[in-house]
Image (tube, rainbow, N blue to C red):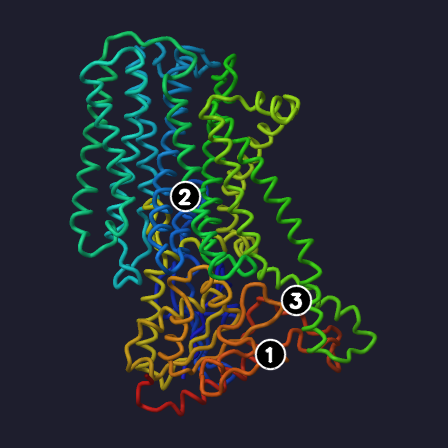
Amino acid sequence: MIELRVHGVSGAEPSVVLGAARTRQVAGDDRGGFYRPDGSDDDGSDGLTLEAYRWGDLPSGTVARTLSMVLLLPFMLSNAAVWMRPTGSRAAGVTVLCRLLALNLTVVYVVSIAGIALDLIAWRCLGATPCRAPFDTLAGLNDRPVGQRLAVLALLPIAAVGLLRLLGSRRPRPVGNPVWAVEPLVERLRAIHVAAALGILDLVLLTARCAGGMTATTTLLLALSVMVLVACVGLVAVPGLLDGAGTARTATVCARATAVVAAGLSVVTLVLVATDGRGWPSSPGLRGYDEIAGGMLLGQMALLVLLSGLVLWQHARVGGLSGLPGSAGAAVIAAIAVGLAGALASGLIYQSGVLLGGYRGDGGPPLPYRWTVLAFFLHVVAAVLLGGALTVLSRRRRRRAAAAITTRDFPAPPPEATGRVRQVTKAVARARFTEWLGLLAAIYAVLALIGLATALLGQFGREPDEVARRVFGLPAGAVEMGLVGGTYLGAAVALTLLVGGLFAYRTAWFRRHVGILWDLGTFWPRAAHPFAPPSYADRAVPELADRIGHLTERHAGVLLCGHSHGSALLALAVLRLPPHTRRRVALLTYGSPLERLYARLFPAYLDSTVLRQVGERVGWRWINLWRDTDPVGGWVFAAHRPGDPAPEAADPAGRVDRRLRDPEHLLPAPGERRAPPLRGHHPGESDREFRAAVRELVGRLGGAGAVEPQ
């Protein structure tokens, strides 16, 4: 028999997973493959052939990881949010709102790049307010007419959209037999987002041109640009249009036609702006830009508030606010995506203005971005304060529950173990903070109102200093401090992402922490934002399923061992196995977040029904090991804590979970200097309990009948 191990997010090297000094690759490629110990005998301690699947390099590569961590992170988060939609009648509404938010993120991205290229450089630096050298004579464009400057520099946001499309088009290979058949949907979304990006750019140019007087041509182009944007919103907003099998062909034709029309309009708009010989009215900034940017940011906040209200109502109605985020996770992740996108866009505007010196004498960057920076600063401060307050307020209850667990595990500890008992209790209490994430998620989602309020104030032309002085009685310096703090905070986020992308790829210990976000975010396919990184699950899961089938043909049985996120990959692979393969497979999971996190965060896709299907597919030859000190993993069906009611004897799911006491002993064993360490979320392939579970499942495999379980 063979034992196939799959690591978790940002997992260790094959040599660590297999416990071997040297390994050799037996299948796959340099990004994802299967490894065995390199020696005369590759059998493990229980006489099993050991093999490990290494998938950690599938999510991205070197340069792509660095660029994507900065550029695509908001898109990746908005894409993950749509997979957190709840079950029931409101799932379609959450899907529509998530996709509209994703579309708005693309528009805000383009508008911010247009703010630098058109408003800051073409209009201000090369005309109204000459910037510091050498930006005041950029490529000789200062001597060219305004229309030509705008047309040439409009190529910059177009190139930025092309860069996003290029980064979002990278795919792990091979991609045959995908888990989720969403590539046709991605093609439709990509056409819609490109059309919206070009449409909003045309709107910026034509609004500025019409400020000097409207003609029949400019009026027609302006109306057509608005129609393109309305068509993009309509294609995304109609429930089931992009996903439905019956409407797939219609949606594809409409999306492609909209993109073609948008591209043609952009060409005509650039030619018109470059060749129109009429004068341009003087103004400190590009006419209409502030209003368009403010409208996009206001729409973003309004969508976020609607999404938060919908999912929080559903969350409170179904299970209250005391559990894990559940369906509220969509609002939380969307809020983080919007906050990051706003911070990066505003920071880009601010830092470009400082570098070029183009906002001198007119109050600074455009008003909508000043409010966005201030909202980001207030949002972060409020989130930190509320998170800290919840940590402190929940500490007593978590400590009390942890003390009860420790007392049951170690009822009569010796006096010299007092400090050790205290350490274990603290570890269990920290791990139980996961149970309070629901309340924290609800509070964080409500903070979206801050962004809506600031966006409304910016839309009405109110200056931050004025509002702070008249409404709150604050001195002007307080607002300036918030603006500066928000600017540097946004720059720090961008720098952290950039440096984190480099170190997460090059440094193993850093990757284990930073890479978690990336590996989890790119697990889900692109169902909301087409420029998000592609899903590696479409390669990893079919590859695992094919390898399991191949191994069952050559071995008497295959024991699948998945740690952390690796258990999710194996669960999905099991669901794809044919009946003749499933008869010779058993499953061992440890540190698994399948129920504790995934089934609650993604209730429409990994709920208890799906987990029961996994158990049925393997004939309930499944053991799940978990520890109270683990903040990520947990039980799947039954906790089996001391004092818990016993599950029904007739239900095989009640025999899946095995709770491991952590640590096994408080004091060092005879002959040892140190006490057993706290294992927490660490894998334990060499632990006594793990090997006992392996032997039990191997025995079940040996006695498995030839009849496929129902």
Q: Is residue 41 visible?
A: no
Q: How crowded is mark 1: few (under 14 residues within 10 Å), some or many (20 or more)?
A: few
The nearer-to-camera label among 1 and 3 is 1
Indicate whether 60 appears above or below 405.
above
Q: Which residue is drawn at 29% across and 44% down?
A: 237
Residue that badge 1 annotates: 644
CA gap between label 2 and label 3 equals 36 Å
Q: Is residue 686 visible?
A: yes
Residue 518 relative to residue 473: left or right? left
Q: Position of residue 703 (x, y in %)?
A: 40, 92
Indicate whether 23 appears above or below 281.
below
* Nearer to the camera, 70 or 468: 468
Q: Residue at x 24, y 9 (%)?
A: 277
CA gap between label 1 and label 3 equals 17 Å
The nearer-to-camera label among 1 and 2 is 1
Residue that badge 2 annotates: 72
Residue that badge 3 annotates: 428
